[in-house]
Structures are given as C-alpha cells and as structure tokens.
Image (cartoon, rainbow, N blue to C red):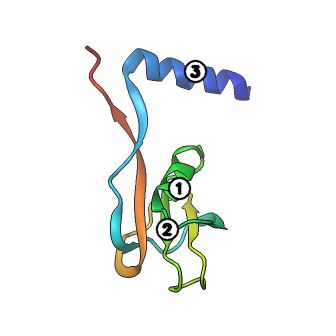
Amino acid sequence: MKKSLVLATAGLVMAFGVQMQAYAMQGNTVRPGATYRSFNLRTTAPAICQRACLNDRRCRSWTYVKPYTLYGARPRCLLKKAVPRARRDRCCVTGVKTWRRHRRY
C-alpha cells in the first residue's frame, strides 16, 4: 500500500509537474501550536529544519527556534501537522510547505 502511494505521487509529479516546495523563510516569525515532532539541531541553520519538513510527508509547516531564546542554548526544530497563524517574534524563523505546479517545457 505504502509503495503504491509513493509511486502514484511520483506519477503525479511526472505527469502534471507538481512538486513539493517551501515558501521563503519568514524571519522573526513563530507559528505556535500543531507541533508533532521537535528536535535539537547541532548547527544554527534554519535550512536544516526546512529540509526536515520537506522530507516528512506529515509536515505542513515548521519553526526553527534560535538558540538562547525559548529552549536554551541549542537551536531547535519544530515540525507542524498544520499551518498555525504566524506571529512576529524574534525567537524564530518559520516556513510553510505547499504544492506548486510547474510549467513543463
């Protein structure tokens, strides 16, 4: 079942040019709530959190928490199962995953 779903999704990507992408990172923004997974990061790189969301089929949005803000000395990644409302806060960087259709030439 899982394999056929992956193959069907791959077929959609090839047939219709649909691809998972992330919106640009939103600096100084947090999306509170809907976290289903969180983990510390070894480096201060929001792109690692963004990539983790893009590679997780359950993830719809993400929040990178800067070190020494909400969770102590280490940066933290929060993967979200929904897209909570964005709020301005210097603690974080956030983003949303979306499907986009690309023109095939």
Q: Which numbered disc, 1 or 2, marks the residue closer to the eye?
A: 1
**Pointer 3 local density, CA inside 10 Å: few below 14, some 14–19, many at least 20:** few
In three-dimensional space, the C-alpha distance between marks 2 and 3, rounded to whole angstroms, equals 31 Å
Marks 1 and 2 close (CB-CB < 8 Å): yes
**Pointer 1 local density, CA inside 10 Å: few below 14, some 14–19, many at least 20:** some
Residue 70 vs 93, above or below: the answer is below
Reading the chain from its start, which is encountered first: label 1 or label 2? 1
Question: Which amino acid, mark 3?
Answer: Ala
Quadrant of the frame with the C terminus: top left
| Depth check, front residue: 34 or 28 | 28
| Depth check, front residue: 88 or 81 | 88
Quadrant of the frame with the N terminus: top right
| Residue 83 image position (x, y, % from top left) | 45, 60
Residue positioned 67% across, 21% down in the render: 4
Residue beneath disc 2? 64
Residue positioned 49% across, 61% down in the render: 62
**Pointer 2 local density, CA inside 10 Å: few below 14, some 14–19, many at least 20:** many
Residue beneath disc 3? 8
Residue positioned 59% across, 43% down in the render: 57
Left or right of residue 48, residue 41 in this image: right
Q: Secondary structure at mark 2?
A: strand
Reading the chain from its start, which is encountered first: label 1 or label 3? 3
| Residue 38 image position (x, y, % from top left) | 64, 66
| Depth check, front residue: 41 or 24 | 41
